[in-house]
Image: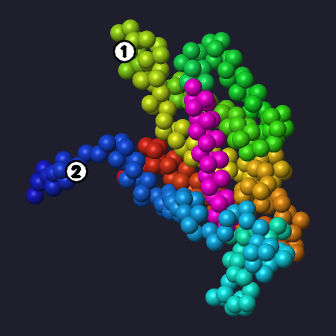
Amino acid sequence: MTTAEITHPVDLQIISRPLRSPLQDAIRSLFHNRSAILGMIILGILVLVALTAPIVAPFPPNAVLIGVEKVTKRAAPCIHLLGCPASEPQHIMGTDGNVRDQFSRILYGARVSLVIGFATVGFAIVLGTLLGSIAGYLGGWGDNVIMRFMDVLLAFPSLVLAIAIVTVLGPGLINALLAIGIVEIPAFARVARASVLTTKEQDFVMAAHAIGSPGTRILFRSILPHTLTPLIVQGTLGIATAILDAAALSFLGLGAQPPQAEWGSMLGAERNQVFTAPHLVFYPGLAIMITVLAFNLLGDGLRDALDPRTRKM
């Protein structure tokens, strides 16, 4: 048997292999990543919980149950299927210090946390990408001015800077969202600038300059699409950070204000009951942990799937 006869079947297999686009390769790699799959499953459950909260929750989130049920004070969790007496009102996660159903408030809190994550990161991505792209494309003094301002923001711990901004603007969920969004901008600006600096030296960008294309057209149509991959990964991980920062601000009384159901504010309101009623701080803390874990797992999976250097074929 000749060498050609030995390699012939392999050559046919390579030639007959269907060609896939980079996007198809990335999606295929993403759905073969266990961390990403687990993150997507958890995130899908959280989104489903947020959407169906009015249907699933047994009570409105802010409803005080005094006079509605035979409850006059904070109650421990009671599940009839697990042996709780049928004469007692059933509350899966108990009631809080204001005699409100904890399970209902946890479900509605998923809505607030997801909105916080997506809204703040969306705001930060838009402004951060715009500033970083302009800085990287212009270079010179424009780059120095923009990036030195970003460096000043990065010099402060993110939570401390967010607290300072909310203190100036006043407590409230909207101001907390704005503060967290401002704190997140430098990270996206640096990622966008690095991508633009790399891309603007490519041959297709030089060709666009040679044929006289306007600078704005080159930046927004030729260069910016190539910055999406690292920004998507950074954005997914940034959502987890934003949810944690928002919970911290609400815990301190600077974010969501009572009686709004938000996990951080629920922790802050019941922090003194950690030994007498630990379920009141355990469930909101567990919800924050699971949400942050889901976005971190998904972000790690996206990074592996979208980076050709780490992609497994």
- The magenta segment is 104-130
Q: Is residue 7 visible?
A: no
Please tell me whether mark 2 sits on a helix, a strand or a loop. loop
- Where, quadrant-wise, is the N terminus in this rendering? bottom left
Does the CB distance between marks 1 and 2 fall below 8 Å?
A: no
State the residue position of label 1.
Answer: 207
Task: Describe the colour scheme in one phrase.
Answer: rainbow
Which one is earlier in the sequence, the residue at label 1 or at label 2? 2
Say which mark, if any, is on residue 44: none
Q: Which residue is mark 2?
A: 17
Residue that appears at 40% across and 47% down:
26
- Indicate the amino acid at tag 1: Ala
Asked whether residue 112 is drawn in magenta, I would say yes
> Marks 1 and 2, Cα distance to the nearest angstrom?
33 Å
Q: Residue at x 57, y 20 (%)?
A: 134
Determine whether 171 is above or below 201 in the image.
Answer: below
Asked whether, in this view, residue 300 is left or right of residue 106, the answer is left
